[in-house]
Structure formats: structure tokens, C-alpha cells
């Protein structure tokens, strides 16, 4: 798993602590050095977090990078990856099936750099024989009434979502995945569509989330959720290695049903 712009995300630690039965996996996080150093500092101060990282663990002298058999933190600027075809990510094995994750990360880059970041993975770091998947979580619909207010409010805070106009619809997100070379399948759902879906165990998850914070303005929540989407695509790879690897993404009972271009 490769998390782009991971920040303070704790997914690796949640996976290791809550899902011990998961098959072995390696997790890579990429972010600016200022962010990676802050995260490593927090990890070093927490015996609970440190215990979840497989030994041996090494860190750079500046404490901006961390490496272990299962977890890596890389102090990299994604813009450098997109502009330098020779850029590599230390310890990243290009031969094993890999999932890329971008949660409101690429949207802050100019479209050509956002596209260049993903194609650096699909065209340079991973050969066609390697099964590869991508999950994007991004805002959409900037031009309706709510979207215009959303963009204006963010701009007042100095936040510009640079890919929003180019990839501001579900259809544009699907076409984006096609252009990246995810030929196995492509799909997209708004957060509202996901939330309202009837998936196995989904009601229990809704109950869990509801206990975190009471939401009185449900209509406003649904309006906001309709302006964010999850898009995902995959390529099978070549030969026997990729056969059936992404089958769960096609399963009708999976939390996010993938239907190719349906």
C-alpha cells in the first residue's frame, strides 16, 4: 500500500492492531519532510505505536524517514516524482501487487503534476506485469450552488483545489482512471451514495460513526457528502500474477461494488 500525502493518517497502525488476521503487507507513506519528521517524533514517543512496527527499525539522522520490514515513511515531494522519471521510492518492491491511495492529496496539485504523479507509478515504477490499483477521495461538482460556496469558503482560507475543475464530475473521474491505464475496471461513488448503500455490516458501521458525533442537520450532511467522491480503478497485470487479485472490487457484496464502466 502506498499512501500519497499521508500526513498524520494512522491507517497502518489501525490495520496492524485491529486486523491481525490480514495477510502480510508493506505500507509506504509519502509526505513533505516537515510532516514526516513530526510523525516520526510522535511514533518514537509512543510505545503503543512503536510496538506495531516490525523490527528492525531505522531512521535517518534528520528523523525525516523511517524504514522497517513492513512500514516506511518517505520524505518526498510528489511534484519531484512527477517531473523526474528517474525518481525512485526506497524499499518499494515494483513486483508485488500494490494499492495507491490519495485522500484529498492530488487535488492540491496542478492537474499536469497530479496526473504526472500517478503516471510515474503506472508507467515508470511498476511494470505492466504488476497488478496495480488506485483509490481517490476528492471533491467534485464545483459549479452548482453548493459547490460555488464550498470553493469560495476554501479560497478565503487560502485553499485552492487545483484539479477540481478538470475532474469535477463522476464521469471525469472515471475517464481520468482510464487515462492512467487502469484497464481492469473503473468506478466512482459519491460519499452520499456510499453512505446510503445497503452493504453487508454497513448498518453497524453507521451506528459506530453515529456514536462519534451527533449529526442533527442530515440534509446539510447529505449535500456535503454529495460533493465528495471515492473513485477507484485497477489493472490486473500480466500473466498469472494478477488473475483474480482485484476480484473483491468486482464482488457485488463488497462495500464498494466495482462495475468497470457501468
Image: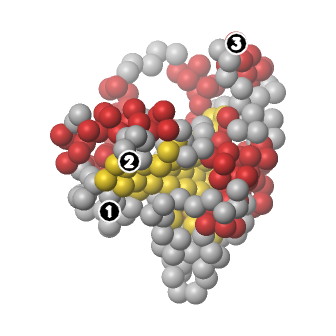
Q: Quadrant of the C terminus?
A: bottom right
Q: Which mark is residue 44?
A: none
From the viewer's perspective, tell me whether residue 43 is left or right of residue 179.
left
Residue in front for this viewpoint, 212 or 130: 130
Asked whether the beta carbons under mark 1 and mark 2 sit within 8 Å of each other, the answer is no
What residue does disc 2 label?
Answer: 60
The residue singled out by tag 1 in the image is 69
- The answer to whether the residues at label 3 and label 1 have Cβ atoms under 8 Å apart is no
In the shown orientation, is residue 35 left or right of residue 83?
left
Disc 3: which residue:
156
Q: Which residue: 63% across, 35% down?
A: 228
Give the residue displayed 51% in from the left and 82% down from the top.
241
Disc 2 crowd rating (10 Å Cα; few below 14, some 14-19, many 20+) is: few
Name the residue nearer the viewer: 136 or 197.
136
**Circle nearer the N terminus (3, 2):** 2
Q: Earlier in the sequence, mark 3 or mark 1?
A: 1
Above or below 162: residue 74? below
Q: Position of residue 239 (x, y in %)?
A: 58, 87
Does residue 180 appear to the left or right of 76 in the view shown?
A: right
Q: Nearer the viewer, mark 3 or mark 1?
A: 1
Which residue is farthest front? 61
What residue appears at the point 36 percent right and 55 percent down from the top-left corner?
A: 67
> Is residue 26 visible in the rendered structure shown here?
yes
Position in image of residue 220 (x %, y %): 59, 19
Mark 3 in CB contact with mark 2 (< 8 angstroms): no
Amino acid at each position: 500500500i502506498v499512501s500519497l500525502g499521508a500526513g498524520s493518517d494512522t491507517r497502518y497502525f489501525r490495520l496492524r492492531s485491529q486486523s491481525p488476521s490480514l495477510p502480510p503487507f508493506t505500507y509506504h507513506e509519502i509526505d513533505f519532510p516537515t510532516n514526516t519528521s513530526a510523525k516520526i517524533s510522535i511514533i518514537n514517543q509512543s510505545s503503543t505505536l512503536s510496538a506495531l512496527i516490525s523490527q528492525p527499525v531505522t531512521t535517518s539522522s534528520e528523523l525525516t524517514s523511517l524504514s522497517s520490514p513492513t512500514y516506511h515513511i518517505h520524505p518526498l515531494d510528489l511534484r519531484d516524482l512527477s517531473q523526474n522519471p528517474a525518481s525512485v521510492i526506497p524499499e518499494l518492491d515494483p513486483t508485488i501487487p500494490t494499492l495507491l491511495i490519495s485522500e484529498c492529496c492530488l487535488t492540491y496539485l496542478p492537474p499536469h503534476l497530479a496526473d504526472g504523479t500517478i503516471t510515474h507509478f503506472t508507467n515508470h515504477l511498476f511494470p505492466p506485469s504488476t497488478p496495480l490499483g488506485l483509490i481517490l477521495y476528492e471533491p467534485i461538482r464545483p459549479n452548482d450552488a453548493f459547490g460555488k460556496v464550498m470553493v469560495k469558503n476554501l479560497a478565503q482560507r487560502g485553499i485552492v483545489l487545483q484539479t477540481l475543475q478538470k475532474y469535477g464530475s463522476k464521469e471525469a473521474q472515471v475517464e481520468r482512471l482510464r487515462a492512467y491505464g487502469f484497464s481492469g475496471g473503473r468506478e466512482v461513488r459519491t460519499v452520499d451514495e456510499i453512505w446510503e448503500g445497503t452493504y453487508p455490516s454497513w448498518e453497524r458501521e453507521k451506528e459506530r460513526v453515529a456514536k462519534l458525533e451527533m449529526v442533527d442537520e442530515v440534509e446539510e450532511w447529505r449535500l456535503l457528502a454529495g460533493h465528495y467522491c471515492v473513485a477507484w480503478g485497477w489493472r490486473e497485470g500480466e500473466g498469472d500474477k494478477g488473475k483474480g487479485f482485484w476480484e473483491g472490487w468486482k464482488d457485488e457484496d463488497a462495500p464498494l461494488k466495482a462495475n468497470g464502466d457501468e
